[in-house]
Amino acid sequence: GIGGSGKQSLTKIATYLAGYKLFEIVLSRGYGDDQLREDLKNLYTMAIKQPMSFLFTDAHVVEEGFLEYINNILTVGMVPALFGDDEKEPLLSAVRQKAKAEGVLETGLWAFACGVIRDNLHLILAMSPAGNQLRTRCRNFPGMVAGCTIDWFFSWPNQALYAVAEHLLGGITLPEENKKGINDTMAYVHLSVTQHFSPDFEAKYKRRNFATPKNYLDFIANYMKLLDANRKNLENMSGRLGGGLDKLVQAAQQVTDMSVELEEKKAIVDENAEKVRALIEDINEKTVVATKRQEEANAAAEQIEKDSVIIEREKADADEALQAALPALEA
């Protein structure tokens, strides 16, 4: 099956249900033939003691020579010259008691150990048929066909796509009237890619495009992630809008309160303004009276000044007459 169709997931589930232990090689930088041989030694060391599932994918084929080891495992169950004579003893000691109980001689002990390993070891090849690579490998390494039971993983039908969408989306809150439509849309979008757009793309550009169940699961996961993000965004916007409306309501209430207070203070100001106007009118009236009296006082002052001049002149004339009369009076 193409990548993402569930080969590895199904292998792990089956391994767990069968009570086997799963073994996979772990690729690292510089991983090569020597590292693979060491991993196979570790695999055989475990398989001599317990049932093992060896999962080998096309991603593990760093070198095409790796498939020669896989071909040997599939055809004869053992990689030739994998163990030196000094390295076989741990495997032989693990089955010596069992072999003795079954009447196996020491000379046939290694063959017996290889048989135990074959019985305990289950090899699973997870390969993609995309392109010509798998076809070429099957021709070069016939054990991949002759020594395997081939299980094809086909595209999920509409019913399966709908059931997966219904299960995954069942844990999120959606309107009841829209749930079926959303599930149908998820299945329709995926099938439209696999049945219509991918064939059209291949016919037009001579290139193949694969939409796998893994892509479908990612599609649903991205929908759920986007839905959650948009809901949070809407909640934040709603919160901000609600806060703004509360501020507007508070401001309106404050304006109402201030308007009432302004009316009260305006009445006081109007009252004081009326008093000020009355006071100004009183002051104006008194100012007119004071001005009139000031004018009368000024006129009286002018008359007094004139009278003073006359009095001074008459006093001077009197003094002069007196001085003239004094000699006659004294004689």
Image (spheres, helix red, strand yellow):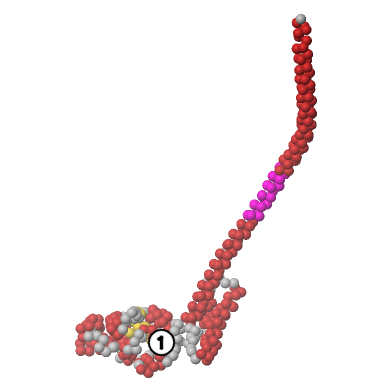
Magenta-colored segment: predominant secondary structure? helix
Q: Is residue 252 magenta?
A: yes
Answer yes or no: is residue 84 visible: yes
* In front of the other: 131 or 1: 131
When the figure is inspected, residue 259 is found, relative to residue 215, above or below; the finding is above
Element at label 1: loop
Residue assigned mark 1: 127
When the figure is inspected, residue 241 is found, relative to residue 146, above or below; the finding is above
Residue at 69% across / 50% down in the picture?
259
Q: Where's the N terminus, which quadrant?
A: bottom left
Q: Amino acid at mark 1?
A: Met
Quadrant of the image occupied by residue 98: bottom left
Q: Where's the C terminus, which quadrant?
A: top right
Quadrant of the image occupied by residue 72: bottom left
Q: Horizontal and vertical percent for residue 278? A: 76, 38
* In front of the other: 189 or 175: 189
Residue at 53% across / 75% down in the picture?
223
Residue lying furthest top in this view? Answer: 331
Q: Is residue 277 left or right of residue 65?
A: right
Q: Horizontal and vertical percent for residue 202? A: 51, 90
When the figure is inspected, residue 303 is found, relative to residue 272, above or below; the finding is above
Q: Which residues are magenta?
A: 250-268
Residue at 46% across / 83% down in the picture?
5
Residue at 39% across / 86% down in the picture?
58
Q: Horizontal and vertical percent for residue 301? A: 76, 26
Q: Is residue 25 left or right of residue 291?
A: left
* In front of the other: 275 or 161: 275
Q: Horizontal and vertical percent for residue 113? A: 26, 86
Q: Is residue 195 left or right of residue 115?
A: right
Q: Is residue 302 left or right of residue 16?
A: right
